[in-house]
Amino acid sequence: MEKRKPDWLKVQYQDPKKIAKVKRLLNHLSLHTVCEEANCPNKMECFSKGTATFMVLGSVCTRNCKFCNVTKGEPEKVDPQEALHLAEAVEQLELRHVVVTTVTRDDLPDGGAAHFALIVQEIRKRSKVTIELLISDLQGSEEDLKTIVEQKPDIINHNLETVPSLYEKVRPMANYQQSLTLLQRVKKMDPNVFTKSGIMVGLGETEEQVLSLMKDLRQVDCDFLTIGQYLAPSKEHLDVVEYVHPDVFKRYEDMAYELGFKHVASAPFVRSSYNAENLRSVLDAEKHASPEA
């Protein structure tokens, strides 16, 4: 039997005119957003603010994660003009902070690393936005990760998604330790690149397991953390085990800050890139506080 959503999970009405403007631009430039492909509950709020999280390398994923609404199957050919179009969209939307994510492309020799590198280059030609890349695990390839890190994006984000004991059920084609190692390698390659990760709760994890995951992330010097409620996209996806109360999210936030994370977003509707533009001020403060600033 499907659980009834509590009152705190109701989405507020947003301005349809601003939403339509963003959609027109995305359609004109043949761009995808994770907002729409993953059916994110925040897409109307983000679109109404004139922001979006761009999803590159097509809209079909080669993995079969049980929580995700992105289409699975045979991936599309890589659009050689995508980097240029994305840079144009960033410029036209006058973004201060841009998030670029991807479907997982295990079919590509480099997992799409060179494409990400080109995107950073094209954006930097046109804009001074801070750049956040939400990348796949690249099947553990250190060389492909280096291709991305060498472009010096401001943030490299890679989500753990859930606690280790739930990986077989939630992320059967991923590996918890491999994801942690990716975040650790980013810091070893370039300590000036900020790292970020995110998880969903409500899948059957315990508070002790969430705390242990946070400690694992801090062990690899992860800077930023997001925690949000898992919401089943359809009846074919994993069931929600629990609707976590906002008080618990606040407790997770407090625990994370005590462990040393520089920025934490923890609330029911938080997603990995939700209100990511707020990180711009955090990045500016950290850069001014650093010895090299």
Image (cartoon, rainbow, N blue to C red):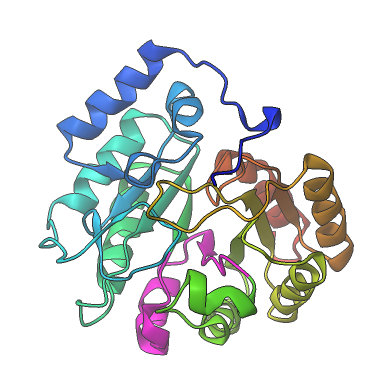
Left or right of 84 in this view: 89: right
Left or right of 264 in this view: 24: left
Residue visible at 56% across and 65% down in the picture: 161
Q: Is residue 287 magenta?
A: no
In the image, residue 9 lies at what x, y percent? 63, 32
In the image, residue 185 lies at what x, y percent? 55, 84
Segment tinted magenta in the rendering: 135-162
In the image, residue 86 lies at what x, y percent? 27, 45
Residue visible at 45% across and 12% down in the picture: 15
Above or below — where is 252 with respect to 104?
A: above
| Quadrant into which the C terminus falls | bottom right
Above or below — where is 244 with respect to 133?
A: above
Please state which of residues 28 and 270 is positioned toward the viewer in this rendering.
Answer: 270
The image shows a total of numbered marks equal to: 0
Asked where in the image residue 57 lies, by quadrant, the reply is: bottom left
Please state which of residues 283 and 161 is positioned toward the viewer in this rendering.
Answer: 161
